[in-house]
Image: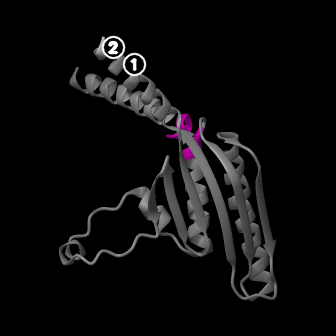
Amino acid sequence: MKFLYLMLFFTVLNTVLSLCPITVDLEFRQEFSAKIRYLFFHYTLAPRPPKKDKKAAEEKPKESKIKTMLQKKGLAGFLEFIKELASVAAGTAKKIFAHLTIRDFLINICVSSGDAAKTAIAYGYVCSAVYPAVSVLFSNTNYNEYSVNISPDFSKGESSVEFNCKAKIKVIFLMSAALYAFKGFIKMKKKQAA
């Protein structure tokens, strides 16, 4: 009987933990700041403090695509990030993004280069990169509200970016996506073996 109570307790605990969301907080002010929270645990993805280990400095391990994206700086880095995020949302991770809920999404971009003609061209380029990417992102996710403001500034000499985003996804959806990916991996291995 104790075994059944124990099994019931762990089943309920597992169900409650899988229904709790993982929250990702992203910010960009000339460089990225990213934090992941689950219940009362939190982890900072970027910016990471530099490692002081000499051995780690000699051996440079291959960095993941996410870490490379989060190390981008300036307006060009942000544009690259938003395009990549939209392509992932519409492509390989479409199933995960369908269960993602985005809150407090804000993009404020001030385009400026010091020269009026260059600023106008840069403004057109930024608009053609950001608006379609945001449209693709929000067509594949759930969202509460968002704000995207892009404006040219002909008097300033430097562009600026302000970006805030909070996204939540329940652990159960991540687990189901991982199982689906594992199932596809097994099928691929069986085809290769045959």
Percent x, y for residue 76? 59, 71
- Does 191 appear above or below 137? above
Which amino acid type is shown beneath numbered disc 2? Leu
Residue ID for mark 1: 8
Q: Which residues are magenta?
A: 88-97
Which amino acid type is shown beneath numbered disc 1? Leu
Question: What's the distance in space between the residues labelled 1 and 2, CA to CA?
Answer: 6 Å
Residue ID for mark 2: 4
Please name the residue shown 39% across and 18% down the image. Answer: 8
Residue located farthest toward the top when viewing the structure as drawn: 1
* Circle count: 2
Which of these two is toward me, 22 or 164? 22
Please name the residue shown 45% across and 24% down the image. Answer: 12
Residue located farthest toward the left when viewing the structure as drawn: 55
Percent x, y for residue 185? 33, 30
**What colour scheme governs how the chains and residues are painted in the rendered image of this protein?**
one colour
